[in-house]
Amino acid sequence: MKPTIIVGYDVETASESTVGFLEGAAALHTRLGIPWAIYVTGETFEKHADMIAGMASDPLLTVGQHTYSHVLLKTIYMTPQDGRPVHGSYPSFIKVGASLDKIREELGRTQALIEDTLATRCRGLTGPWGYYRGLADRPDILAIIEEYGLCWIRTNARECRDCQPTPFTEQPFFYRDQGFPEILELGIHGYQDDFYWERFDNRRYGDTYLDYLIGKLDEVLSAGQVWSFCSHDHGTPSKAVFDKTRGMWLKRFFDRAIELGFRFVGPGQLYKELQAGSG
């Protein structure tokens, strides 16, 4: 496969940052012609339903979900083993995942919100926080995901310490061994965003997150891999702020990827391509 980038944003703050982010990201992706997906929590969707509905007709945009209230699908147990605290805890950090009943409630409620408002089936899910091995060890959760018609998910987003970066060797895969051959794991590669780069990166590629992104492009290009890329609607109270901060490094990252010959696709297209080639 030609080196490919699939862009997905976790839209979860239910705040003015959501508005600034969506306005800025929409303008950026329209200008560059790059497909993008947003994975929206139900709480955020309720607050900004009119805005998202007004954007949903854009053929570049795919709307997915991120649970209703950002509950974890699986417990994470972060053990960085580097002598530094993580999320304010030392030497490890644990956050407990939701019960199956709670997961079913959260996914079902958000599916209904999106589908009733947009009059289209929601097919994509990002699991809050992300997990080591995705849901390969949780067929019980995969059964709930299948129940709601979700086809592509981003849950494989941590390495063996439950930390980051996620290795790029963790390429998209179908959950065939678990009995769910129609569910595609896209994963999230590298860091989920600049805040995890700030905590975990060794600065091998340089002193900024953009240095890391640009450096990884060459490696992904050489390996002919898929890069499932993630960012968030954090710290962007207006489009002007987005353009000066997150949007600035996103644009430079995208521009360099285009120069190198990467292709950009939406999750639905990649799903169809991989499904067609899975036999």
Image (cartoon, rainbow, N blue to C red):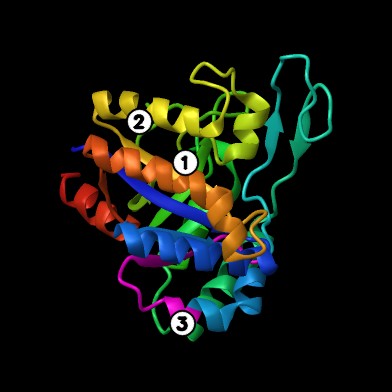
Q: Secondary structure at mark 3?
A: helix
- Kindly indicate whether the residue at mark 2 contacts the one at mark 1 (C-beta within 8 angstroms): no
Amino acid type at mark 2:
Leu
Q: Foreground mark, 1 or 3?
A: 3
Q: Nearer the viewer, mark 1 or mark 2?
A: 2
Using the image, tell me which numbered label, if any, was put on residue 52. none
Which residue type does callout 1 highlight?
Answer: Ile
Q: Which residues are magenta?
A: 53-68
The percent position of residue 81, horizontal first and vertical second, equals 71, 15
- Depth order, front residue of 40/136: 40
Q: Which mark is residue 188?
A: 1
Instruction: Work out whether residue 127 can be spotted.
Output: no
Question: How far across and how far down the image is residue 9, in percent?
Answer: 50, 55
Where is mark 2, residue-wise? 217
Residue type, mark 3 in image? Gly
Quarter of the figure with the C terminus: top left
Q: Residues within 10 Å of mark 3 (few under 14, many from 20)?
A: few
Give percent across and percent down for residue 134: 50, 40
Residue drawn where x is 59% and y is 17% of the image? 202
Whether the residues at callouts 3 and 2 have beta carbons within 8 Å, the answer is: no
Q: Is residue 28 left or right of 41 when viewed as pictured?
A: left
Mark 1–mark 3 Cα distance, whole angstroms, equals 27 Å
Q: Quadrant of the N terminus?
A: top left
* Element at label 2: helix
Q: Earlier in the sequence, mark 1 or mark 3?
A: 3
Residue wearing tag 3: 54
Q: Quadrant of residue 43?
A: bottom right
Residue 55 covered by magenta stretch: yes
Q: Earlier in the sequence, mark 3 or mark 2?
A: 3
Q: Residue at x 70, y 29 (%)?
A: 78
Residue 91 forms part of the magenta stretch = no
